[in-house]
Image: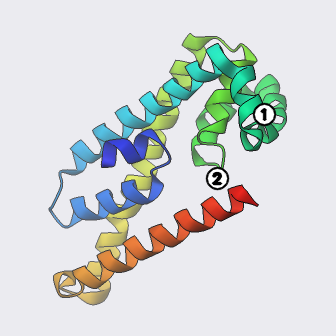
Amino acid sequence: MLALGCFLEGETILALAGYAAHRGYLDFGWVLAIAVTSGFAGDQFFFWIGRRHGAAVLARWPSIAAQTARVGRLIERYHAWVIVGMRFAYGLRIAGPIAIGASGLSPRRFALFNALGAALWAVAIGGAGWLFGQALQKLLGEVHRYEAAIVIGALFTAAAIALARRRSRRG
């Protein structure tokens, strides 16, 4: 689940995995390793889709095409920052690598900065989940009494966010 979530746009899943690692359910090192590897692989996959089928993808999905012009201008000026930063930008996690792939940027250069971005992202988001667990423990003491309610609340929040994203993409 963590690998699939990080392959796509898994901030919520990664933060929950960081929290689970803090609670001792998962190993934090493995959470980070899976997040870096899957996040890197996902962006590489979408980069190559853009590289090989950029025009067809952009014609088929206008929502991605709408982001392409903006991403294209940024790539020309600040490609290293764009590659690392797109991972943290809402709505650009899939569209960004496709647009960068279609732009003709060197695959080696993309891979280098994509690896850096994946590592920073995994540490930042997974670490935020870990720190959230630590803060909860300090605030509430023994969190295990409230854990079920917290997990249910987090899942409900994740589902609400996913539903809101889906509706905003349609409209």
What is the three-letter code of the residue carrying label 1?
A: Thr
In percent of the image, x 47 and y 27: which residue is there? 115
Q: Nearer the viewer, residue 21 or 44?
A: 44
Name the image quarter holding residue 76: top right
Q: Mark number for residue 90?
A: 2
Is 98 left or right of 46, judged from the image as shown?
A: right
In percent of the image, x 77 and y 30: which residue is there? 59
Helix, strand or loop for disc 2: loop
- Marks 1 and 2 sit apart, C-alpha to C-alpha, by 14 Å
In percent of the image, x 36 and y 43: which residue is there? 4
Judge the density around disc 1: few (<14), some (14-19), many (≥20) Cα neighbours within 10 Å.
many
Give the answer, above or below, for where 114 lies relative to 106: below
Indicate how the structure is coloured in the image. Answer: rainbow
Q: Nearer the viewer, residue 74 or 45?
A: 45
Q: Mark number for residue 105?
A: none
In percent of the image, x 18 and y 55: which residue is there? 26
Give the answer, above or below, for where 166 lies relative to 46: below
Q: Earlier in the sequence, mark 1 or mark 2?
A: 1
Q: Nearer the viewer, residue 110 or 10?
A: 10
Q: Nearer the viewer, mark 1 or mark 2?
A: 1
Helix, strand or loop for disc 1: helix
**What residue is shown with label 1?**
68
What is the three-letter code of the residue carrying label 2?
A: Tyr
Residue 51, given in percent of the width and then of the height, sits at 64, 16
Quadrant for the C terminus, please: bottom right
Name the image quarter holding residue 77: top right
